[in-house]
């Protein structure tokens, strides 16, 4: 004889399992992230679109640069304008000068800025926060105001129209960023690891070189990226402090001011490529840094 199912009555205030499951699933689902992805894609397109337009303009025939309306997909590619620009007098020498200035600036910034960032991260002293603000205020002085005194000083020192003079100015411009970036990176390096190295016989300098410095390589790569790009793109100080030893941005600025539009695009493309190549080679360290932050 079958027994009829009778509805079960729950005590007052009790919650059924079917009511809990949707809330648990909604809680596990987490925040909606698609607006962040859309914003990231839009920012990336905003940054990449000028580079793409300069590239297709530099690789297009001269007559196609003035065409209207312009097509986002080039119908014809030509290296004539770019090769003419690269074979122009002074371009190769100025590109080499830019590489040398960038390397010297990179080395000086890391050698001076890395110990300074480590000291800000590891040692508590009076006025540390004020010192960080003071570092940033050095970027408030326009290079236009400082150009003439710097030129006079370098003439007196015998450094005018030299690569070293431009590298020293670029180092002064890059040091605030280098110090603050390395300081934030050394804060994330565990102090316990260095203390363990000290107990095992390492000196403070040895613990810094063997423990803290390798762990901070991703941050140093980021500082190197900003330093090299700043040095490569800086034009005003290089134009004021040099005459025959021009860097590539200064050479483009002084020689292509009255040139036809296709040659200006070729000069812009020549300025972009080395920075992209440099970013390509250090991208591994940048990805490691971002991975540590995400985890």
Image: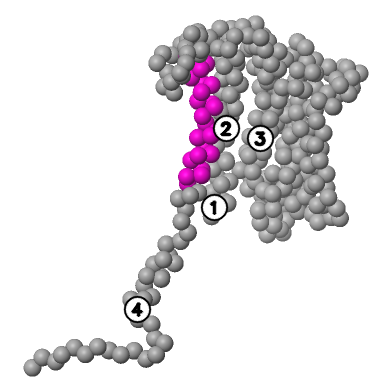
Q: Residue furthest left?
A: 1
Distance from disc 4 to disc 2, alpha carbons, whole Å, reads 54 Å
Distance from disc 4 to disc 3, alpha carbons, whole Å, reads 55 Å
Query: What is the magenta range?
Result: 37-60
Asked if labels 2 and 3 touch by Cβ distance under 8 angstroms, the answer is no
In the picture, the disc for residue 17 is 4
Quickly name the residue at label 2: 279
- Indicate yes or no whether the magenta region holds residue 33: no
- Indicate yes or no whether the magenta region holds residue 54: yes
Local SS, label 3? helix
Local SS, label 1? helix
Asked if labels 1 and 3 touch by Cβ distance under 8 angstroms, the answer is no
Tell me the quarter of the image containing the N terminus: bottom left
Q: Counting residues from the N terminus, which is met first, the one under dot 4 or under dot 2?
A: 4
Q: Residue at x 44, y 23 (%)?
A: 72
Q: Counting residues from the N terminus, which is met first, the one under dot 4 or under dot 3?
A: 4
Asked if labels 3 and 4 touch by Cβ distance under 8 angstroms, the answer is no
Distance from disc 4 to disc 1, alpha carbons, whole Å, reads 35 Å
Quickly name the residue at label 1: 294
Q: Residue at x 75, y 53 (%)?
A: 122
Distance from disc 1 to disc 2, alpha carbons, whole Å, reads 21 Å
In the picture, measured across the screen, residue 282 lies left or right of residue 107, that is left
Q: Residues within 10 Å of mark 2 (few under 14, many from 20)?
A: some
Which one is closest to the eye, mark 4 or mark 1?
A: 4
Q: Counting residues from the N terminus, which is met first, the one under dot 3 or under dot 1?
A: 3
The answer to whether residue 179 of the structure is visible from this angle is yes
């Amino acid at each position: 004889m079958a027994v009829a199912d009778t509805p079960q009555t729950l005590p007052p205030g009790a919650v059924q399992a079917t009511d809990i499951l949707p809330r648990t699933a909604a809680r596990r689902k987490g925040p909606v992230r698609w607006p962040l992805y859309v914003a990231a894609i839009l920012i990336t397109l905003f940054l990449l679109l000028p580079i793409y337009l300069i590239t297709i303009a530099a690789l297009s025939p001269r007559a196609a640069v003035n065409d209207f309306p312009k097509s986002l997909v080039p119908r014809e590619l030509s290296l004539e304008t770019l090769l003419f620009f690269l074979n122009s007098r002074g371009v190769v020498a100025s590109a080499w000068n830019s590489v040398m200035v960038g390397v010297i600036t990179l080395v000086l910034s890391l050698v001076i800025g890395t110990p300074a960032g480590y000291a800000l991260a590891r040692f508590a002293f009076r006025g540390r926060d004020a010192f960080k603000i003071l570092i940033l205020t050095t970027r408030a002085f326009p290079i236009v105001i400082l150009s003439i005194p710097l030129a006079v000083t370098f003439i007196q020192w015998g450094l005018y129209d030299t690569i070293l003079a431009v590298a020293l100015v670029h180092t002064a411009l890059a040091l605030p960023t280098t110090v603050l970036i390395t300081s934030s990176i050394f804060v994330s390096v565990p102090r316990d690891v260095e203390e363990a190295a000290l107990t095992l016989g390492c000196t403070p300098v040895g613990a810094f070189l063997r423990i803290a410095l390798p762990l901070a390589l991703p941050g140093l790569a980021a500082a190197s990226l900003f330093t090299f790009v700043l040095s490569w793109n800086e034009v005003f100080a290089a134009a004021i402090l040099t005459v025959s030893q021009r860097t590539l941005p200064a050479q483009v600025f002084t020689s292509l001011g009255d040139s036809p539009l296709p040659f200006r695009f070729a000069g812009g493309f020549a300025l972009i490529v080395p920075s992209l190549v440099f970013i390509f080679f250090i991208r591994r360290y940048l990805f490691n840094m971002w991975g540590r932050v995400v985890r």
